[in-house]
């Protein structure tokens, strides 16, 4: 992971600078409201596939859930929605920054190089209803989040409060083979001389879609990925595929 953190800074210096100098946006800030209800599916062998995921860090003030982007029941696996369930109170100074990174594992189970991914913001009003409220960006600062929240009638008393009603859509077309999504939080900026060697805080989670039953998942994936599976602790539970379907659906938002 030391190499991974080093690569985070290298990528951020290049990509954030690049995104500030050119228009990367493929999304306007005025997209229509879409319903993101996630359908349940199985493969040809009857194995449950979850289109939702979460981090397994178990941190009280920083956690996130992921789901494949869905519009009116149609899945688009090039886009992953992210919702933070908790967020640190320290993300409130002028240089606090949030970024998203994607990577995978090699044949030995080691992590591969990280790629920084663009994303845009959505206004989340519950009941799987989302409205796009920003263009595509590579880094979100506290100032950006605070002003966006105010524009859409969302409380900006803290990042945690604002993120109860703001979600993210991360564009995986830049890293289609990635299996891990990481959210990196910097309190001293990112891509600048003031940036720390690594994120002050970070989370990682398996990118959906994948087999919900970890006993099925391990037959085609390595142990590094298995330990990031949201249902890793259920491996000895003898749950049915229907039960894993229910568990997977429970991670959606």
Image (cartoon, rainbow, N blue to C red):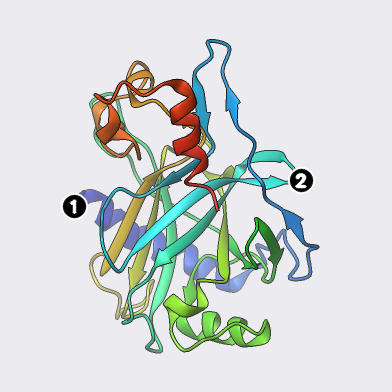
- Checking the image for residue 213, the label placed there is none
Q: Nearer the viewer, residue 196 or 124?
A: 124
| Residue 2 image label | 1
Name the residue nearer the viewer: 239 or 8. Answer: 239
Q: Write down the quadrant of residue 238 in the picture.
A: top left
* Residue on which disc 2 sits: 72
Residue reaching furthest left? 2
Q: Position of residue 242 (x, y in %)?
A: 49, 25
Rendered position, 230 above or below 192: above
Question: Helix, strand or loop at disc 1?
Answer: helix
Residue at (44%, 29%) from the top-left corner?
244
**Mark 1 touching mark 2, by CB under 8 A?**
no
In which quadrant of the rendered view does residue 196 lie? bottom left
Q: How many marks?
A: 2
Q: Quadrant of residue 9?
A: bottom left
Mark 1 Cα shell of 10 Å, populated few (<14), some (14-19), many (≥20): few
Viewer-nearest residue: 127 or 109: 127
- Nearer-the-camera pick, 127 or 85: 127
- Residue lying furthest top in this view? 45
Where is residue 204? Give x, y as percent: 34, 50
State the image coordinates of residue 49 (x, y, percent, origin top left): 52, 28
Residue displayed at 66% across by 40% down:
76
Please, what secondary structure does the residue beneath circle 2 have? loop
| Residue 128 higher or lower than 167, as above or below | above
The residue shown at (27%, 65%) is 60
Reply above or below: 198 against 40. below
Residue at the spot x=26%, y=55% of the render? 58
- What is the distance, in whole Å, between disc 1 and disc 2 at their CAs? 41 Å
């Amino acid at each position: 992971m030391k190499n991974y953190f080093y690569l985070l800074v290298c990528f951020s210096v290049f990509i954030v600078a690049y995104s500030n100098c050119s228009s990367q946006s493929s999304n306007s800030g005025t997209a229509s409201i879409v319903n993101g209800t996630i359908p349940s599916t199985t493969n040809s062998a009857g194995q449950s596939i979850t289109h939702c995921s979460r981090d397994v860090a178990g941190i009280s003030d920083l956690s996130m859930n992921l789901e494949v982007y869905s519009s009116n029941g149609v899945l688009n696996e090039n886009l992953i929605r992210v919702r933070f369930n908790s967020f640190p109170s320290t993300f409130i100074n002028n240089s606090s920054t949030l970024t998203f990174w994607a990577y995978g594992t090699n044949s030995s189970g080691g992590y591969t190089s990280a790629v920084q991914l663009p994303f845009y913001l959505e206004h989340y009003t519950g009941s799987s209803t989302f409205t796009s409220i920003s263009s595509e960006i590579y880094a979100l600062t506290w100032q950006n989040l605070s002003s966006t929240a105010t524009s859409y009638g969302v409380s900006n008393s803290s990042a945690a409060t604002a993120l109860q009603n703001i979600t993210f859509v991360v564009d995986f077309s830049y890293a289609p083979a990635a299996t891990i999504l990481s959210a990196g939080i910097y309190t001293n900026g990112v891509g600048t001389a003031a940036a720390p060697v690594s994120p002050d805080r970070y989370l990682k989670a398996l990118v959906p879609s994948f087999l919900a039953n970890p006993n099925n998942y391990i037959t085609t994936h390595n142990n590094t990925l298995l330990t990031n599976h949201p249902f890793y602790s259920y491996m000895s539970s003898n749950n049915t595929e229907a039960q894993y379907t229910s568990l997977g659906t429970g991670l959606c938002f």
